[in-house]
Image (cartoon, grey):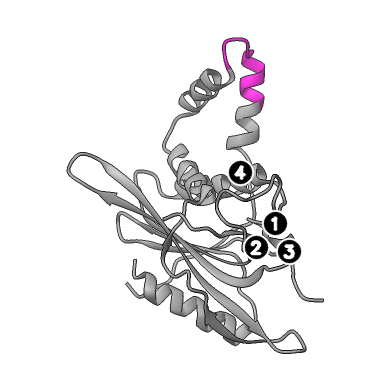
Amino acid sequence: MQIDKIIQMAKDHILKHGEHLPEIIVELDTQEMHIMGCPDVTNSDESLEKQHRFFTAGRMLGEENPGKDIAHIAFTVEAWVGQQKLGEVPPNYRPAQDPNRKECLIIATLDIVAKADAKYIKQHCHFAEMIRDGSGKLIDLAASGLEGVKAQSKLLTAFLAGFGSAQMTKEQRDEVLAKTMGPDATGEEVRRLSKQIFERKMYMANVTPSAIPRKRTAHSYGKAKKKRR
């Protein structure tokens, strides 16, 4: 996956159209590329709910691609970037409520790196600050000073887990849930939770193009609800 070209395409798109809906680009180990428009994937204030949505999106893609693995993921979204320093983030902190927040276009990436002994996950984030005029119209993007920083995204790992869960049988999934829930969980409780987690559906526009250009930071980021009045 050529992340520089993906970043440039995202920048070109938002400058042309004034907005960029949440978009997930996935490259499989077969070199197939999938672009998924997921307008509601981050539209929640609850972290676990957002993770479940990413898990669901990954599971749905995995069900369509049995026997394949993910090589790279890129997720593009508009969001507020808060300025709280690492270690100073108060409980229930939300970047959208930070008086010093910045409005940014964010491209988060996850790469599966194969080494001799195992496979490893590497994640980075790329930020471009959105500059608006007095009327609120987007007129430019500025360097944020946070290009290609290492940043762990629970959302992308949830997507990866969802994709992997599609390779498991229902019995295997229920067994994992039963172990997680503990010995007091009844079979009915396991089946109910399994249905909630693994049978959920969501809107996802999946477009496979004919040709696609082949330190944890002291900042945090979150979904911008929207935005300017």
Q: Are marks 3 and 1 in contact (CB under 8 Å)?
A: no
Q: Which residue type carries mark 4?
A: His
Sequence-first disc among 4 and 2: 2
Q: Which residues are magenta?
A: 182-192
Residue marked by disc 1: 43
Q: Which residue type carries mark 2?
A: Pro
Sequence-first disc among 2 and 3: 2
Sequence-first disc among 4 and 1: 1
Q: Residue at x 66, y 25 (%)?
A: 192
Quarter of the rendering occupied by the N terminus: bottom left
Residue marked by disc 2: 39
Residue marked by disc 4: 52
**Furthest residue in direction top, as rendered:** 184
**Furthest residue in direction left, as rendered:** 116
Question: Which type of secondary structure does the marked residue at label 2 adopt?
Answer: loop
Query: Relative to 206, is 45 on the left or the right?
Result: right
Label 4 CA crowd tier, 10 Å (few <14, some 14–19, many 20+): many
Residue marked by disc 3: 225
Instruction: Locate residue 127, reporting x and y percent.
Output: 51, 70
